[in-house]
Image (spheres, rainbow, N blue to C red):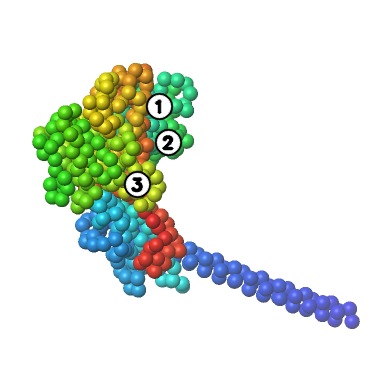
């Protein structure tokens, strides 16, 4: 009896153990099956992402290489179609990509930005997809807050200077700091030099980091991250009247813009912008002449090549109310405040944007004469630079410099505030540590995708935005209302 019971108990234990083994085996199988499926999903998802990136890069290459650009402002099929994507080689799946021009590309010739959307499809145990978007545009001079082709190291940037946008120089620049506190040290949104160093301090030592001695470039927490915020040894960008097609600006004015000959504008004339009108007063004795600009097919003004200099400012009551480019071979003397009527730079409908381009001359902060200017009539023709003032514009001197006519005036330090940027061969003296002007550049964010009408571009293209959009659908690639730029 005892032996039979023991055998019965052993049999029950075997059955129980077998049941546990079956359960554990089923669980393990289920676990491994799930793990394999997850690995397959991950592999296919990764492949879909890589294929989307390949599609974006292929579309970008085709666009830059001269593929036919969209003729209107609507997204155009570029690789495949919404219902028939294009197969990639090597079993990389298929892609569907569109090119969506910026709405301003055709309207006022002030943007050449293109949004590329792409979704990739990869087949496997399931059909995986992945989307991306990017904005590309030709490299336009206006995208920099500061561009210097041949920077001088005879002068330096000191406490109080502010460059609220991309800073670029084809060579080293000299940076200083006078005190041990960092809150007023030079501010760079980003800092790019083709040289492998910048100069610091009275000894002009070669430096490669954003902080040294008394200097701590601001915002320090961002610049210490390195590229693209603080980047040395970058590629050279060609610049100058022999490198860029400035003639396109002149031709646009001759064709359907406004060309002012030397009888209409003489050297030393005073010009003023008010709303969509340019006023020209050649001397105190002659009446001002108004030139309406709002109806121009090409919103471009070119001043006769024989004119070596003009004074320019805005109206004290009404700012510029249009997109406009003014070009000449001679020099622009900035003689007072120049504002936009709409100063909301975040307004998507704000097209007030001014470009001033000198081919062989300079951009100069005019010296205040310190005398009664009533002889010139309206205040918009007066030279008023005895204190700080703002110039809302993109300032370009292809073969010249940005400087002050008299860096010892005003007698106390003032700021020449540029709402936009400047692109020059070099920067001359604008002041001393106790007199004249420091430069404060407050970058216009619209310049990342817009530029003044017909402004010259380089042969380079830039990617200004790249965004992963994993859940992007083919329908959204086609219509794309989700991303405004």
Helix, strand or loop at mark 2: helix
Count of all numbered marks drawn on residues in the image: 3
Counting residues from the start of the chain, the first of labels 3 and 2 encountered is 2
Q: Residue under label 2, please give it.
A: 223
- Quadrant in which the C terminus is drawn: bottom left
Among the 4 quarters of the image, the one containing residue 174: top left
Residue to which mark 3 is pinned? 446
* Mark whose residue sits in front, 3 or 2: 3
Marks 3 and 1, how far apart in space? 25 Å
What residue is pinned by disc 1? 160
Q: Which mark is residue 425?
A: none
Dot 2 or dot 1: first in sequence order is 1
Q: Is residue 31 left or right of residue 190?
A: right
Of the pair 372 and 392, the residue shown nearer to us:
372
Q: What element carries label 1?
A: loop
Residue 399 occupies which quadrant of the picture?
top left
Is 139 positioned to the left or the right of 23 in the image? left
89 is higher (above) or lower (below) than 262: below
Could you say which is closer to the camera, residue 228 or residue 455? 455
Q: In this view, does 205 lie above or below 8?
A: above
């Amino acid at each position: 009896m005892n032996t039979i019971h023991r055998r019965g108990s052993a049999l029950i234990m075997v059955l129980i153990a077998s049941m546990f083994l079956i359960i554990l085996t089923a669980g393990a199988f289920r676990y491994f099956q799930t793990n394999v499926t997850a690995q397959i999903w991950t592999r296919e998802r990764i492949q879909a992402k890589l294929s989307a990136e390949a599609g974006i890069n292929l579309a970008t290459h085709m666009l830059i290489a001269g593929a036919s650009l969209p003729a209107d402002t609507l997204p155009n099929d570029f690789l495949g179609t919404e219902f028939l994507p294009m197969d990639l080689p090597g079993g990389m799946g298929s892609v569907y990509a569109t090119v969506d021009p910026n709405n301003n590309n055709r309207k006022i010739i002030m943007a050449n930005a293109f949004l590329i959307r792409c979704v990739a499809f990869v087949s496997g145990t399931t059909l995986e997809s992945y989307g991306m978007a990017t904005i590309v545009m030709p490299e336009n001079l206006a995208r920099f807050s500061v561009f210097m082709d041949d920077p001088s190291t005879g002068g330096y940037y000191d406490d109080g200077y502010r460059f609220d946008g991309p800073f670029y120089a084809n060579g080293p620049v000299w940076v200083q700091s006078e005190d041990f506190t960092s809150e007023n040290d030079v501010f760079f949104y980003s800092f790019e030099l083709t040289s492998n160093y910048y100069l610091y301090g009275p000894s002009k030592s070669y430096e490669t980091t954003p902080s040294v001695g008394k200097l701590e470039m601001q915002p320090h927490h961002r610049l210490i991250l390195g590229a693209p915020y603080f980047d040395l040894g970058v590629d050279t960008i060609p610049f100058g009247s022999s490198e860029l097609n400035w003639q396109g600006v002149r031709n646009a004015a001759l064709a359907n813009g406004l060309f002012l000959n030397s009888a209409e504008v003489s050297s030393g004339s005073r010009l003023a912008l008010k709303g969509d009108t340019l006023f020209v007063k050649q001397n105190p004795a002659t009446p001002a002449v108004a030139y309406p600009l709002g109806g121009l097919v090409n919103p471009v003004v070119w001043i006769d090549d024989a004119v070596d200099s003009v004074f320019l400012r805005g109206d004290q009551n009404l700012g510029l109310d249009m997109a406009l480019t003014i070009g000449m071979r001679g020099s622009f003397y900035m003689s007072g405040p120049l504002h936009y009527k709409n100063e909301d730079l975040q307004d998507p409908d704000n097209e007030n944007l001014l470009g001033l381009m000198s081919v062989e001359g300079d951009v100069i902060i005019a010296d205040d004469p310190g005398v009664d200017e009533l002889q010139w009539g309206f205040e918009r023709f007066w030279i008023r630079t005895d204190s700080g003032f703002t110039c809302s514009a993109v300032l370009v001197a292809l073969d010249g410099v940005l400087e002050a006519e008299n860096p010892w005036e005003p007698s106390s330090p003032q700021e020449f505030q540029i709402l936009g940027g400047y692109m020059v061969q070099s920067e001359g003296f604008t002041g001393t540590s106790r007199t004249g002007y420091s430069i404060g550049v407050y970058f216009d964010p619209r310049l990342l995708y817009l530029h003044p009408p017909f402004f010259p571009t380089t042969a380079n293209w830039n990617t200004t935005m790249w965004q992963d959009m994993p859940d992007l659908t083919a329908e959204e690639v086609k219509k794309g209302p989700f991303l405004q730029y």
